[in-house]
Amino acid sequence: MREENTVNAIETSGLVKIFGDTRAVDGVDLTVPAGTVYGLLGPNGAGKTTTVRMLATLLRPDDGEARVFGHDVRADPNAVRELVSLTGQYASVDEDLTGTENLVLLSRLIGYSRPRARERAAQMLEAFGLTEAAGKQVKHYSGGMRRRLDIAASILNTPRLLFLDEPTTGLDPRSRNQVWDIVRAVVSHGTTVLLTTQYLDEADQLASRIAVIDRGKVIAEGTKGELKASVGEGAVHVRLRDADRRSDARALLVRVLDAEVLLDADPLALTARLTGRATEQAAEALAQLAREGITVDNFSLGQPSLDEVFLALTDKKEAAA
Ligand SMILES: Nc1ncnc2c1ncn2[C@@H]1O[C@H](COP(=O)(O)OP(=O)(O)OP(=O)(O)O)[C@@H](O)[C@H]1O
Ligand SMILES: [Mg+2]
C-alpha cells in the first residue's frame, strides 16, 4: 500500500454506473489532489451524486476503478469509510432534536465521552454561527441553518475527505456565503473537499480545479482559469430594431470585437462571445453600432451561463470530432 499522505485524495479511471438503460456514470476519470476543493460541475442528471455515492462506498461501481487515498472502494470499503464523510448521508440530523442534542448524540456515536461531546457540540455550533439556535428543534431551522448544521455534523471527527453534494442549492445569497466560508475553513484544516454543484459561480468561488460533467462523462477538466479561457469571458446579446441590418451588425461586431458572433433563432438577435475585457469591448461595440446607424432595441452583457459553458464545450468537442 502506498503512503497515504503522498497519494491523491481521489483517483478514478473508467468509472461506470448503469441503472437499467441509463449509463448514469459513463467512464469517469478523476484525479483530486489532497488538500484542495475540487468542483464537480454539471446540470441535473449529469451523474454527480452517483459518482459521489460510489466514492463514498454507498453504491458499487459497475466498471472501472476508484481509489480514495489509495484505498480501492471495492476491495477496501471499510478503509475508505474511515476517511470520508458525506453531508446529509452519514450525518443524519434528527428534526425533532435540537442542534445541541444532535451534535452531542453524533459525537457520542463516534466515540467522544459525554463531557467531550458537549464541548465539541458547543464549539461546532459557535463556529457555524448556530449558538443562538442551539436549543431549538431542527425542524424550526431555516434552510441555511439546517445546511450549516448538516455540515457541522459531517465534520465532527474531521474527515480526510468531505463530500458536499450541492450544499447551497435553494439557499439565499447570504446563507450561500456562510456555507462557502465554512467550506474554506474546513479546507484550511487540511480536509479535501469534493464539491458537486450546478452553479458555475460556486465552483468559481471555492474550487481550485473543476471537472465539468454531462450525461455521465467528463467533458472538460482544468483549473478555473483554463476553463474560463476555453469559453470566453462573457457574452453580449444584442437585439436590433430592423432584421435587415443583422448581417451589417454581425460584420461590425466581428470586426470590433474580434469575436465569434452567432445569429440567434430570433431574426433580430445576435450573440457575441467575448474574449478580453468584456465591459470595455461591449461599450465600444454599442458605440460603433450607433455610429453606423444600426438601432439597438435591447442589449445585455452577461457572464457565460452554465448553459453557455456547456454549449461552448460541446461545440468544441463536435468541431474536433
Ligand atoms: N437509484 C437510481 N435508479 C435509477 N436511476 C437513477 C438512480 N440514481 C440516479 N439515476 C439516474 O442516473 C442519472 C444521474 O443521476 P444523478 O443523481 O447522479 O445526477 P446528478 O448530477 O446528481 O443530478 P442533480 O443535479 O439533479 O442532483 C439520472 O439520469 C438519474 O435519473
Ligand atoms: Mg445530485
Image (cartoon, rainbow, N blue to C red):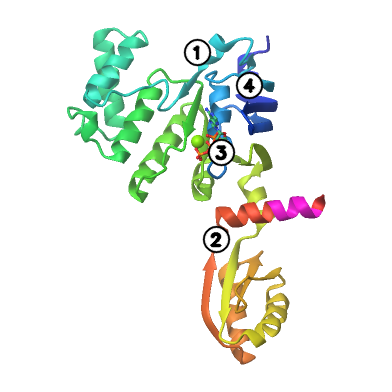
Element under label 3? strand
Q: Amino acid at mark 1?
A: Glu
Residue 130 lies left or right of residue 301; in this view the side is: left
Separation (CA) of disc 2 from disc 3: 19 Å
Q: Secondary structure at mark 2?
A: loop
Q: Compare marks 2 and 4 and give the one earlier in the sequence.
A: 4
Q: Are marks 1 and 3 in contact (CB under 8 Å)?
A: no
Is 297 inside the magenta-drawn segment? Answer: no
User: Of tags 2 and 4, which is closer to the observer?
Assistant: 4
Q: What residue did someone put label 3 on?
A: 39
Please identify the residue farthest to the right as the structure is shown: 321
Q: Amino acid at mark 4?
A: Pro
Dividing the picture into quarters, in which one does residue 194 lie? top right
Q: Which residues are magenta?
A: 314-319
Q: Which residue is mark 2?
A: 303
Q: Which residue is mark 1?
A: 82
**Depicted 227 relative to depicted 28: above or below:** below
| Foreground residue among 21 and 235 | 21
Looking at the image, is mark 1 or mark 3 earlier in the sequence? 3
Q: Residue at x 69, y 21 (%)?
A: 65
Residue position for label 4: 61
Image coordinates for residue 199, horizontal then vertical, percent: 50, 47
